[in-house]
Image (cartoon, rainbow, N blue to C red):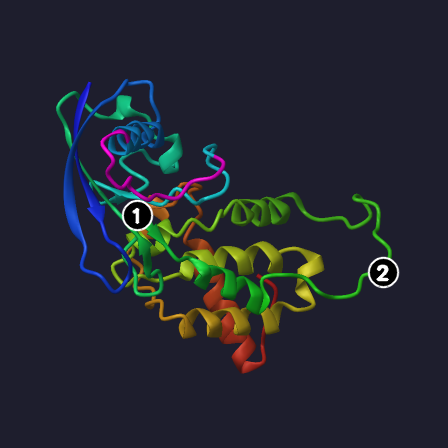
Amino acid sequence: MKIHLKVWRQRDNDSKGYLEDHTVEADEHMSFLEMFDVLNESLVSEKKTPVAFEHDCREGICGSCNMVINGQPHGPQSGTTTCQLHMRSFNDGDTIFVEPWRAKAFPVIKDLVVDRSAFDRIIQSGGYISVNTGQAQDGNAIAIEKDRSARAMDAAECIGCGACVAACPNASAMLFTAAKVAHLGTMPQGEVEHTLRVQSMVKQMDLEGFGMCSNTGACEAECPKEISITNIAMMNRSYVGSVLGSEKSV
């Protein structure tokens, strides 16, 4: 199948970007990243600069394959990352626009690669459990209700890819931050630091320059792990409660 690509090229964050035209002969069984490998092999053989794009596991785990494909983060297939998207999702002769995440807090490093270290700093501000629990207890020693552990595990699925930010018209990181807060705050081990955690992480999120949530729901729709926006409501309740001194577990 012949695919026409319009790929975003940008030397660095201070340079002006542009869309570059390419044509690739792809197999329908290729993943989207494998199709980009074919493109780059062609560019290298022509002694041209290959397109910079980020990837690691190529199994939908690491969250690094961040591309906006035809206006949708990770492409048209719901519940998948870019590396899990296959060319059979497109038709022969299609024109595909490929761009990087668009957010002030995610400056462009080169082409399709953006700096997502803002997420790392949000985690460093409170996305952990640091209380001294002594010697590790048996895994079944702390009884946890099934629905409670399920909510924590659902939130823990967040891979920090940034699709929620790219999808949001305000470039908000609320879904990412809320997933981390809910994951830890829902479990007994994380309750001790929950008040400090939610305040610290929300503060750092604002310092990074992310926008505010306006409940459009685009983040949930484009999240490859389908994290629910109910986590945002939980975080908002926790934040207000912590500020007013009436904090309760999410």
Compare marks 2 and 1 and give the one earlier in the sequence.
1
Q: Is residue 115 left or right of residue 56?
A: left
- Quadrant for the N terminus in the image: top left
Q: Tell me the SS state at disc 2.
A: loop
Q: Which residue is drawn at the image coordinates 26% and 30% (left, top)?
A: 39
Q: Tell me the SS state at disc 1.
A: loop
Q: Which residue is drawn at the image coordinates 41% and 73% (left, top)?
A: 206
- Residue 217 in view (yes/no): no
Q: Would you call the spot at circle 1 few (<14 residues within 10 Å), some (14-19), or many (20 or more)?
A: many
Q: Where is residue 177 in the image (x, y as percent from the top left)?
A: 47, 60
Q: Which residue lies furthest to the bottom in this view?
A: 244
Q: Position of residue 26 (x, y in %)?
A: 25, 21
Q: Would you call the spot at circle 2 few (<14 residues within 10 Å), some (14-19), or many (20 or more)?
A: few
Task: Identify the amino acid type marked 2.
Answer: Gly
Q: Which of 194 and 23 is in front in this view?
A: 23
- Quadrant for the C terminus in the image: bottom right
Q: Position of residue 168 (x, y in %)?
A: 29, 56
Q: In this view, does 219 lie to the left or right of 23?
A: right
**Where, by quadrant of the figure, is residue 17 drawn?**
bottom left
Image: 127 above or below 163: below
Q: Is residue 150 left or right of residue 223?
A: right
Q: Position of residue 100 (x, y in %)?
A: 28, 49
Instruction: Find disc 1 in the rendering and name its residue.
Output: 112
Q: Residues in magenta?
A: 45-57
Q: In this view, does 15 lie to the left or right of 220?
A: left
Helix, strand or loop: magenta stretch = loop
Instruction: Find disc 2 in the rendering and name its residue.
Output: 134
Nearer the camera: disc 2 or disc 1: 1
Instruction: Please tell me whether residue 55 belongs to the stretch shown in magenta.
Output: yes
